Image: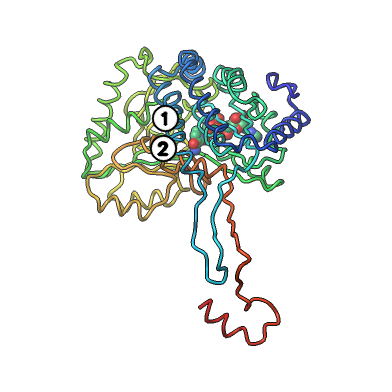
Amino acid sequence: MPDTHHPHLFDDQAAAALRSRLGNTFATGRTHDLAWRKRQLLAVAQWLRDADDAIMTALAADLGKPALESYGTETGFCLAEIRHTLAHLEAWAAPERVSSPMVNLPSRSWMRHQPKGVALIIAPWNYPLQLAVAPMVAALSAGCCVVLKPSELAPATSALMAEALPRVLDAEAVAVVEGDVAVSTALLAQPWDHILFTGSTRVGRVVMEAAAKHLSPVTLELGGKSPVIVSRDADITLAAKRIAWGKGVNAGQTCIAPDYVLVERAVQDRFQHEIIATFKRFYGDDPQLSPDLARICTPAHHARLVGLLDGGTILHGGRHDVRDRFLEPTLLTDVDLDAPVMQEEIFGPILPIVPVDDLDEAIAFINARPHPLALYLFTRDDARVDRVLGRTLSGGACINDTLSHIAVSDLHFGGVGASGMGGYHGVHGFRTFSHTRGVVQRYGVADVPLRYPPYAGNLKWIRKVMR
Ligand code: NAD
């Protein structure tokens, strides 16, 4: 049996042995059973409840996550996803009848949703529990076996999952392999029946290339720069509050965090005034002392973010302390559009503010860049909503809020173009890990003789039937 707790021992051979072990479990057929799937989901939920405190401690160690954010965006989020899945699983898994064409009559046609097999899930560090457990819930709901590779940059949360999940779940069907790039590379060399990767666009390309060797299907949950448009007709106080919140949660280390703001010049001053006041209200005069602000993942990430501050004028914030991995929520104006802060995903508590003359300029700005993972628009005018949604493309979108589309279980969650492909959550996660198999069942009683040779004289009848 491969040693999944000592990454240095996890090589290609260990990855092959693990793949084969889980493949054997899948071949027994026991994971197809809806009762098995439900038992696994209930066991994950029970563990999340039992380990609530331990999870908070781990997330605090890894990222300084405030307890409310730990529960709301990680533990509670996963519990809601499991509850929703358990409530709908039977309906999602039921065969779907479709109508049959005349040439096939008598017959019936339907789609079966069958588990794809053994899935590999690779998770990032920023929501180290949610982004490992929620995809695993989707894979288990579909009846797949799962190998989970958490991020090495959230070691406390990774260790917790590695210890607990195989213990509370069917350990011959679910494995957790801790480790870094080398472990990930060894795993990616194996032929998986599905790979769900969450992480950077750069590594997404590596994953897709490895998957291509075996034609393994992939879901890529990537990142990018998610813009916010603040329209001149918006409720500016509300916009400032919800944008500051979306940027402040997890210190901006959120894949769908508002990356930068495009604000109509007519309301720029008012917006800036409101968002400064909001940050002060949220985190006080000395945000380093606030218990409600998470920390930056590593000193290296911290250094990168501090470097990004050079891309504009600091309107508010800018204080930092690497010893505490602290970076104050910071507003930048007069930003250089060619500077790294406007070229790469920020992934931290820095918010550039870019004025635009009107909505058309904002739309053109967004369309000149890769499709973002999320797009946010603050307006009270439905015509403006239609205009922006109709003329742009992004993974998901929120009107008059940020982040909240991720909490709707039945909304497809995924990127488009450079921000990813495929998606999950709710029924979409179930479908991602299921193969939709089209089946026709015919009956021997009657037959349309026209399709059989010799064809002489049949064409005119076939034309009539298939018109
Ligand atoms: P990352 O791409 O560096 O790492 C993600 C995972 O891939 C980790 O488990 C890591 O060990 C592994 N990995 C790293 N390099 C690898 C390589 N060369 N080959 C194989 N595996 C490798 O991403 P990260 O820094 O952990 O996360 C931040 C990124 O993830 C951001 O771009 C963010 O937007 C994105 N993200 C996206 C979503 C989403 O749902 N779309 C959610 C969270 C984060």
Camera-side residue: 95 or 325?
95
- Kind of residue sitting beneath label 1: Ala
> Which residue was labeled with disc 1?
80
Residue 279 position, x and y percent, is 30, 24
* Label 2 with label 1: CB-CB less than 8 Å: yes
Mark 1 burial class by Cα count in 10 Å: few <14, some 14-19, many 20+ = some
Residue 51 position, x and y percent, is 49, 16
Q: Does 372 appear above or below 455? A: above
Alpha carbon distance from label 2 to label 1? 8 Å
> Which residue was labeled with disc 2?
409
Camera-side residue: 290 or 3?
3
> Is residue 162 visible in the rendered structure shown here?
yes
Ligand 1 quadrant?
top right
Tell me the residue at 67%/40% (across/down).
Answer: 192
Mark sitting earlier along the chain (2/1): 1
- Kind of residue sitting beneath label 2: Ser
